[in-house]
Amino acid sequence: MSDQIIKVEKLTKNFGDITAVNKLAFSVAKGETVGLLGPNGAGKTTTIHMLLGLTKPTSGDIRIFNLSLRHNRRKILQRINFASAYISLPSNLTVYENLNVFGKLYGNRTPRRKIGDLLDLLEIPEVINQVTGALSSGQLTRLNLCKAFLNDPEVLLLDEPTASLDPNIAEKVRVTLQNVQRERDVTMLYTSHNMQEIELMCDRVIFLSCGNIVAEGTPQEIIDNYQTKSLEEVFISLARNSKPKDFSELG
């Protein structure tokens, strides 16, 4: 995993007098799954939004596939995708209609078979003709993952991908993500507040606190460095010792 697919240098985002992200520097190698962790207000969501080009950095550099995001956003976005349990798709469209629109946006002129295969993969084929607004939260979470797989991405940015799922379905989703990662050598940046899930899924983790990287390494290295029994204990320690921002929506 020597090829750097994502490389961030001195990435900073200020909102007025508040620094949400402060000179972040990290990389993610091809085929690696990296957890981006931290309490609410740590800077996770802001970082992901900058990686997607949704939020413009105050300063710093983002390179994906060795291309500058600033100058090659469209080319990069064709090869990556994003899923979050907190994104809403148009509720008045059916599941098929939503996925068909995205499939065509991603360049697939006949996405029907792809849509069926993905709904089978996430074990929700029965919802294909249902109105999206009528789905349960767990079904919506899996629908967002189906959307994220439509363009066979080389990079997946995942924000709480198993939120709202019961333990049985959450385990199935984790296995699906692991299988996709292995079969396609997909690079993943993964946020979650479930530290057991992070230990299972991630090769390496990056802890943010108040916009700064405060710990980085394999899950076991961080557990050993903090002399704790689990990542959850590390998370609690960092959360209790961080200075909370006055706007938690920056994530």
Image: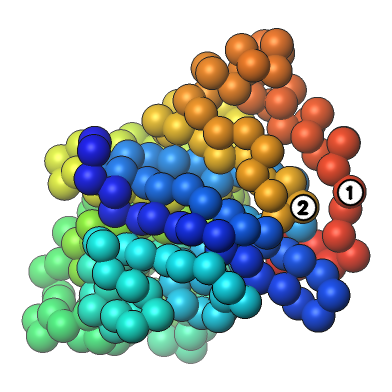
Q: Quadrant of the N terminus?
A: top left
- The residue depicted at 37 percent of the width and 46 percent of the height is 28
146 relative to 54, above or below: above
User: Does residue 124 show up?
Assistant: no
- Element assignment for label 2: loop
Q: Nearer the viewer, residue 82 or 187?
A: 187
Q: Nearer the viewer, residue 1 or 79?
A: 1
Residue 29's spot in the image, x, y percent?
31, 44
- The residue depicted at 62 percent of the width and 66 percent of the height is 12
Q: Quadrant of the C terminus?
A: bottom right
Residue 247's spot in the image, x, y percent?
84, 67
Three-letter amino acid code at disc 2?
Cys
Q: For mark 1, does the 10 Å Cα neighbourhood hold few (<14), some (14 to 19), or many (20 or more) residues? A: few
Write down the residue under mark 2: 210
- The residue depicted at 23 percent of the width and 57 percent of the height is 154
Give the mark nearer the N terminus: 2 vs 1: 2
User: Does residue 63 show up?
Assistant: yes
170 relative to 245, above or below: above
Three-letter amino acid code at disc 1?
Lys
Label drawn at residue 243:
1
Q: Nearer the viewer, residue 144 or 243?
A: 243
- The residue depicted at 15 percent of the width and 41 percent of the height is 183
Residue 81's spot in the image, x, y percent?
34, 66
115 relative to 187, above or below: below
Relative to residue 42, is residue 205 drawn left or right? left
- Element assignment for label 1: loop
